[in-house]
Image (cartoon, helix red, strand yellow):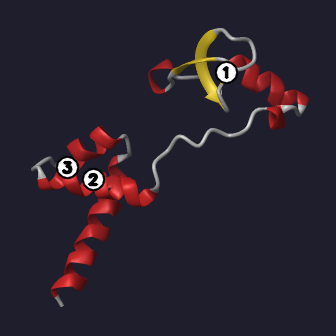
Amino acid sequence: MIDPRKCTEVLCACCEELGLHGGRGLCHTCYRRHLAAGTLAQYPRLQTWLSAQGRIADFAELRERGLTVREAAEQIGVSLRTAERYQARLNSQEGVAAA
């Protein structure tokens, strides 16, 4: 079952209706239909995310402003666990720079 709180709405590239995003710019209904029919290749994957380095840089900037790890994670749209990994990476880089 789809949790609508975790989905964004999209103007579907297939039916041109507004609906919950299923992937590849398709609403959930069209995504499932094309998946079953084997025609998803008609709709390329969307490349909308930032690179990992870009997200880490954004995370570092938010942490420098005084936000907590949790607050910074919410701001850049990553999980708390991912933000903790970013913090560990930043901490290890500081240790290398200080040595």
Q: Quadrant of the C terminus?
A: bottom left
Can the viewer see residue 28 in this picture?
A: yes
In the rendered image, the residue lying farthest to the bottom is 99
Gap between marks 2 and 1 measured at Cα: 31 Å
Mark 1: amino acid: His
> Which dot, 2 or 1, sits closer to the camera?
2
Check disc 1 and report the residue beneath it.
28
In the rendered image, the residue lying farthest to the left is 66
What is the secondary structure assignment of the residue under circle 1? helix
Relative to 95, is 27 on the left or the right? right
Is disc 3 surrounded by few (<14), some (14 to 19) or many (20+) residues within 10 Å? some
Q: Depth check: 25 or 29 in front?
A: 25
**Residue 62 drawn above or below residue 37:** below
Relative to 95, is 25 on the left or the right? right
Residue 62: give its label.
3
> Which dot, 3 or 1, sits closer to the camera?
3
In the rendered image, the residue lying farthest to the top is 17
Mark 2: amino acid: Phe
At x 72%, y 17%, the residue is 29
At x 52%, y 22%, the residue is 3
Check disc 2 and report the residue beneath it.
59
Residue 63: give its label.
none
At x 47%, y 27%, the residue is 6
What is the secondary structure assignment of the residue under circle 3? helix
* Sequence-first tag of 2 and 1: 1
Is disc 2 surrounded by few (<14), some (14 to 19) or many (20+) residues within 10 Å? many
Is mark 2 in CB contact (under 8 Å) with mark 3? yes
Instruction: Find residue 37 and report its horizontal and vertical position in percent.
Output: 90, 28
Identify the image quadrant of residue 28: top right
